[in-house]
Amino acid sequence: MPALGLVVALALALAATGCGSETGRGPDGVGGTAPAPATTIDPRYEPLPPGATTVLVVGDSVILGAETQVPAALAGWKVTFDAKESRRIQAGISLLKARKGPTPRVVVIHLCTNWAEAGYAKQIDDAMAELDGVDRVVWVTCEPWRLEVASANADIEGAAGRYPNLVVADWAALAERPGYSYSDHLHLKTPGAVALAALVAEKVGPAPRP
């Protein structure tokens, strides 16, 4: 039966060249499927490895309005909360310099509400020098109620490119939502305090195993 023999021969030839295969040839002409591109996760957004569970929060009157909500949102962490009305970044740096005892695992900073000049980036550098050895620094932006605060927010965003352990918590992007603040558009009502605490907790990450 010559016709049947011809069909069998053609089928064998197709199988030998890989035609009709689902994998076939990759885009470079080599047999097999091209590998998927590798993805890289920025380590500053990964959970911290086992170790200390200490968090220091340093802030002004805005985050002071979330004094109850922030520690509650940081379940499993041992939180020291130090916020004060009218505190500026320079006073916060002085506080960091004066601290004694073990270095916190994470430090949260919210100190730009009262900024009224240029050069906030230098203040960030001074603060980060005091935070050497801290695994993660969460720097919170502020409601840009004046141009100097908006400039400070831009400096905070820029600092994330200089410091691999600095994570930005962009409160400025959320602060204007209805019901979050009082008529001054700065200080927090309860929904705003809950939202700020949730943002901080997201950026701090889950408490590691001791």
Image (cartoon, rainbow, N blue to C red):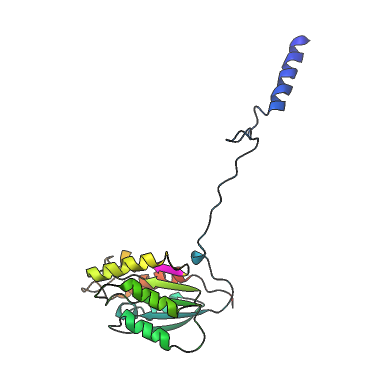
The residue at the point 56 percent across, 74 percent down is 208
In x, y percent, where is residue 128? 42, 76
In this rendering, position of residue 42 left or right of residue 17: left
In the displayed structure, would residue 97 be above or below residue 120? below
The quarter in which the N terminus is drawn is top right
Can see residue 26? yes
In x, y percent, where is residue 125? 39, 74
In this rendering, position of residue 205 left or right of residue 176: right
| Depth order, front residue of 54/28 | 28
The quarter in which the C terminus is drawn is bottom right
In this rendering, position of residue 144 left or right of residue 22: left
Find residue 198 and report its image quarter. Answer: bottom left
Find residue 154 and report its image quarter. Answer: bottom left
Residues drawn in magenta? 166-170
Residue extending farthest top: 2
In x, y percent, where is residue 51? 58, 77
Residue 59 is one of the magenta-drawn residues: no
Residue 169 is one of the magenta-drawn residues: yes
| Depth order, front residue of 182/52 | 52
In this rendering, position of residue 167 left or right of residue 50: left
In the displayed structure, would residue 142 be above or below residue 61? above
Find residue 118 and report its image quarter. Answer: bottom left
In x, y percent, where is residue 14? 69, 24
Residue extending farthest left: 183
Judged by its main secondary structure, the magenta piece is strand
Number of disc labels: 0
Can see residue 174? no
